[in-house]
Image (tube, rainbow, N blue to C red):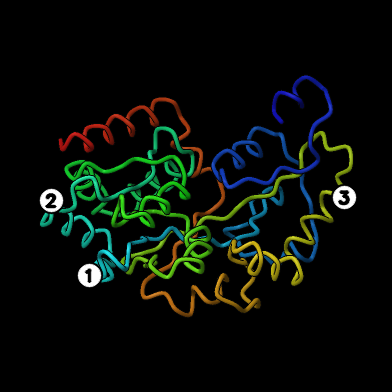
Amino acid sequence: VVGEIDAGTATADLTLSSAMDLQIKLVNDGYGQPYFSGETEALPDWANWRNEAFGFTYEPAVIIYNRALAPELERVVSRFELAKMLSERSLDMRNRVATYDPEYSGLGYLFATQDAARSEDFWYLARSLGDSGVQLMRTSSSMIDKVASGDALIAYNVLGSYALARARENPDLGITIPHDYCLVMSRIAVIAKAARNPKAAGQFIDFLLSQEGQELIAGPAFLYAIRTDISGEATAKNLQDTANGPLIPIRFGPGLLVYLDRMKRADFLSRWQRAMEGK
């Protein structure tokens, strides 16, 4: 999109992405355009930035585990408890835990940097993961496959929408919403600055945020509806009603740009690599 706009060639009217930081950068760098409607104004403040970036899902980062092979992992309900369990069971959990590789996964990098900013236990957990020979994956689907097959017994920071969809097919997959706090991400819609049909793009955003659109998101799509008046398992309302700890949506805005800075990214990944080496 950036290259097409800079070159003055045709580009997409609307971009939809789970890469929250990159979508915010797109807007921050002047590649979006504002849109106003009753649907966008009804969004929570954290999910609407400058009336150019609009969230339309409410997806938790969860822990998943293999119920058939390790039912006791149901008791691992926080980052500290996960780190403690890995330290205490270093032999039998060796190579049996998975998480995102923040170097190669944009969403994994986002979750890891958000964790580091919020949790005093994060680097303790990172070192415990490293000591356990963690399997670093690029996608949530890969982590779910590992846990479902038994190649891993537990996985951390899996996208809850994908986990829920797979758990409906496989009852051996357990899902835990962390009790210390649960990060919530949102897919973001941005109308391109050079959109040839911005009206149609705005209408599609309104559909995504409408009751009909949100029911589709919560139903067939399993992406967790952001509207709190939508009922069902994959909804913000259900998460808010059933969570045993705080839900922390990742707020749209300049804060998401901090770790896109090259030096900050390099420093973070260097510290992560040291943690993977148990340092």
Residue under the image location 38 percent in, 67 percent down: 172
Q: Dot 2 lies on which element?
A: loop
| Image quarter (top left, top right, bottom left or bottom right) of the C terminus | top left
Q: CA distance from mark 3 to mark 2?
A: 55 Å
**Amino acid type of disc 1?**
Glu
Residue 36 sits above or below residue 44 on the image:
above
Nearest to viewer (mark 3 / mark 2): 2
Q: How many marks?
A: 3
Q: CA distance from mark 2 to mark 1?
A: 16 Å
Disc 3 crowd rating (10 Å Cα; few below 14, some 14-19, many 20+) is some
Residue under the image location 48 percent in, 33 percent down: 260
Would residue 24 appear left or right of 245 to someone viewing this image? right
Q: Quadrant of residue 79?
A: bottom left
Task: Name the disc covering residue 90, or none.
Answer: 2
Mark 3 = which residue?
A: 200
**Amino acid type of disc 3?**
Ala
Task: Name the disc covering residue 72, or none.
Answer: 1
Q: Which mark is first along the chain, 2 or 3?
A: 2
